[in-house]
Image (cartoon, rainbow, N blue to C red):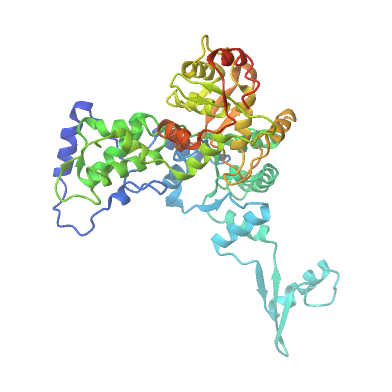
C-alpha cells in the first residue's frame, strides 16, 4: 500500500493547486463525470479512503486462516466496500443474505457462481468397473446401473449414464480446491436458526484438515446478531474474528472530498466546504459521497465533469436550503410513520407544549428531543431526559422519560415501511410479553431502544435517518400536524403534573 501523504491544514490549498496543475493537458478524452467521482451507493473507485486499523486486521486474518471473519457495524459505514477492496483481487465468491433461507440455497448459489454441475456422466467402460459398487449401494447386485441413474443406450455395446451427486459434496470439493474466499453479505437478514445451520455447514471448510488448509469465510453484518449466534455455539467460541467497522470521523470523511476534488480539478480553500459536509454526514461515507456530489454538481458550482482548468468551489448561497434538498423520500416515510405512531382507540393523545410555541404528542416529542441533540447517534436515558427537558415548556422539566412511548417506537421501527401498524393495544401486549422487536431477520430498523433500566440506550442505526431529523423534522411535523377538532392541548401546568409519569403519551 502506498504511503499516505500528510499535510498541515495551512498547506492544503497550495498542495491542491500543485497537484492539480501537475495534471496532464486537458486534451484528454477520458474526462471523469462528477457522478463517477462521487458515487453514493457504489464502489468508490476514485475516492476510496483507506482505514489502516481495519485493513491491517483483514490482512492478518488472510494470513492466519482458521477463523470466520465477521465484519460488523452500523449501516452505511463502508463494511462491504472494505471487504471488496481488500479481497477483490482474490475474486471472492459473493453471496447475498437476502433470500438465504437454508444451507441448500447457499450451496446452490455457490455452485452457480463456480459453474458447477452435480451430474457425472459415465461411459460403458467406466460402468463395467464401477457398476457392481454402484448397484450394491442400492441393492441391485449384478447390474451395471444404479437406481435413480439416467441411462442412455447409444448402441448394442455402448451405454452412458449420469449419476447425480449431492450438491453439498460437489461444492465442498470445489471450495477445497480454490483459494477464492467465500463472502456472505448482509447475513443479518438470515433467520437465526438458518445462520446456525450455515455456520455448522461451513465449519469443516474453515478449519481445514490434514490434507487441505482451511478456507476463508467472511460474514458482513449490521450489529452483533451473527456474533451472538457464533458465541452461542460451544464449538465456535474462539473460532471467529470480529471486526467492528465504526462510524467515520470528520478527518476520514474530509479525505473523501479532498480526493474527489483533485480528480475534478476543483479546489476547496482550507477544506472549509469539505469539513462542513463531513460534519453533517453522521459518520457515513455514503452520505458524504452524496453531499459532495450535490455540492459540486448543483448551484452555484454546476460542475458536471472534470474541468479543463482549475477552479475554486463556491459555497451554497443558503446552507439550510442545500442540506434540506438532500432529504430522502424513503426516510421521510419512516419519520412520518414514527411521528404518527399507532392508531388509538377511545381517546385522543394529549399534547405537550414546547418552548417553540408548538404542541406535540409523545411520539413527536421524542423525535424533536433526539433531533435537538444534533442528533447524537446514541443517547442514554439521562441524555434523552435532558433533551426533553430542554425543549418542553414545563418548569421544572419532567424527571422521567416516556418509556412506554419509546418502546412503542422501537416496535414500530421493527416493521416494514409499508406494513400496517398494529394498534396501540397490540403493541403494548407485545411489550408486556417481552417480545424482542429485532428478532425478525428481514428487517433493518432505523432506530433501536434497548430497555435495561438506568443503562437503557436509544440508538439511531441509520445515518440517513439522523440526517432527516437534523434537517427535515420541523418541516415534516408542520406538514403532518394539521389541526383537528378533537386534539387537546394541555396547559403548561397540566402538562407538568401529567409528565411526572408520562403514562398517557403513547
Name the quadrant containing residue 256. Answer: top left
- The relative height of residue 385 versus residue 190 in the rendered view (above or below) is above
* Residue 207 versus residue 57 in the image, above or below: below
Q: Residue furthest front?
A: 485
**Residue that appears at 59% across and 19% down:** 401
Query: Which residue extends farthest top?
Result: 396
Residue 258, horizontal then vertical, whole percent: 27, 38
Q: Report x, y in % for residue 459.
A: 53, 28
Image quadrant containing the C terminus: top right
Q: Is residue 74 visible?
A: no
**x and y, in percent, of residue 281 in the image:** 38, 34
Name which quarter of the figure residue 463 lies in.
top left
The image quadrant of residue 282 is top left
Residue 247, position as x, y percentages in the image? 44, 32
Total number of numbered discs in the rendering: 0
Q: Nearer the viewer, residue 468 or 173?
A: 468
Q: Is residue 21 left or right of residue 31?
A: left
**In this rendering, position of residue 72 left or right of residue 164:** left
Q: Nearer the viewer, residue 400 or 276?
A: 400
Q: Is residue 125 visible?
A: yes
User: Foreground residue, 375 or 18?
Assistant: 375
Q: Is residue 114 above or below residue 203?
A: below
Q: Image point 85% across, 73% down: which residue?
A: 140
Amino acid at each position: 500500500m502506498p504511503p499516505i501523504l500528510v499535510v498541515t491544514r495551512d498547506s492544503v490549498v497550495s498542495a491542491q493547486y500543485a497537484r492539480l496543475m501537475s495534471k496532464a493537458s486537458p486534451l484528454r478524452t477520458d474526462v471523469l463525470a462528477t457522478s463517477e467521482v462521487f458515487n453514493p451507493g457504489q464502489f468508490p473507485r476514485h475516492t476510496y479512503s483507506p482505514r489502516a486499523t481495519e485493513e491491517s486486521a483483514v490482512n492478518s486474518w488472510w494470513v492466519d486462516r482458521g477463523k470466520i471473519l465477521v465484519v460488523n457495524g452500523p449501516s452505511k459505514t463502508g463494511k462491504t466496500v472494505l471487504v471488496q477492496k481488500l479481497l477483490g483481487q482474490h475474486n471472492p465468491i459473493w453471496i447475498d443474505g437476502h433470500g438465504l433461507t437454508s444451507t441448500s440455497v447457499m450451496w446452490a448459489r455457490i455452485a452457480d457462481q463456480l459453474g458447477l454441475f452435480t451430474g457425472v456422466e459415465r461411459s460403458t467402460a467406466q460402468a463395467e468397473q464401477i457398476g457392481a459398487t454402484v448397484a450394491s449401494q442400492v441393492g441391485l447386485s449384478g447390474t451395471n446401473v444404479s437406481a435413480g441413474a439416467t441411462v442412455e443406450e447409444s448402441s448394442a455395446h455402448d451405454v452412458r449414464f449420469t449419476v447425480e451427486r449431492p450438491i453439498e459434496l460437489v461444492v465442498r470439493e470445489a471450495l477445497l480446491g480454490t483459494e477464492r474466499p467465500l463472502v456472505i453479505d448482509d447475513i443479518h437478514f438470515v433467520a437465526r436458526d438458518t445462520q446456525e445451520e450455515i455456520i455448522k455447514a461451513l465449519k469443516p471448510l474453515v478449519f481445514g484438515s490434514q490434507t487441505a488448509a482451511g478456507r476463508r469465510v467472511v460474514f458482513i453484518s449490521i450489529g452483533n446478531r451473527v456474533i451472538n449466534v457464533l458465541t452461542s455455539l460451544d464449538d465456535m467460541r474462539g473460532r471467529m474474528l470480529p471486526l467492528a467497522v465504526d462510524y467515520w470521523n470528520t478527518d476520514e470523511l474530509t479525505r473523501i472530498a479532498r480526493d474527489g476534488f483533485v480528480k475534478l480539478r476543483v479546489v476547496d480553500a482550507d477544506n472549509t466546504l469539505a469539513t462542513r459536509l463531513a460534519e453533517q454526514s453522521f459518520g457515513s461515507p455514503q452520505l458524504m459521497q452524496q453531499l459532495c456530489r450535490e455540492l459540486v454538481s448543483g448551484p452555484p458550482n454546476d460542475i458536471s465533469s472534470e474541468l479543463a482548468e482549475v477552479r475554486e468551489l463556491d459555497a451554497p448561497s443558503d446552507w439550510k436550503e442545500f442540506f434540506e434538498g438532500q432529504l430522502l423520500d424513503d426516510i421521510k416515510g419512516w419519520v412520518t410513520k414514527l411521528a404518527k405512531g399507532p392508531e388509538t382507540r377511545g381517546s385522543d393523545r394529549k399534547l405537550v407544549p414546547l418552548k417553540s410555541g408548538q404542541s406535540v404528542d409523545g411520539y413527536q416529542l421524542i423525535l424533536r428531543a433526539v433531533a435537538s441533540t444534533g442528533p447524537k447517534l446514541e443517547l442514554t436515558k439521562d441524555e434523552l431526559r435532558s433533551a426533553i427537558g430542554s425543549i418542553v415548556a414545563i418548569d421544572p422539566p419532567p424527571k422521567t422519560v416516556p418509556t412506554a412511548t419509546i418502546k412503542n417506537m422501537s416496535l414500530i421501527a421493527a416493521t416494514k415501511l409499508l406494513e400496517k401498524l398494529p394498534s396501540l393495544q397490540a403493541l403494548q401486549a407485545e411489550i408486556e410479553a417481552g417480545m424482542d422487536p429485532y428478532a425478525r431477520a428481514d428487517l433493518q430498523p432505523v432506530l433501536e431502544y434497548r430497555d435495561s433500566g438506568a443503562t437503557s440506550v436509544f440508538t439511531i442505526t441509520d445515518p440517513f435517518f439522523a440526517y432527516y431529523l437534523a434537517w427535515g423534522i420541523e418541516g415534516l411535523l408542520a406538514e403532518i400536524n394539521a389541526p383537528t377538532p378533537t386534539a387537546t392541548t394541555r396547559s403548561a401546568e397540566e402538562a407538568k403534573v401529567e409528565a411526572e409519569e408520562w403514562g398517557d403519551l403513547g
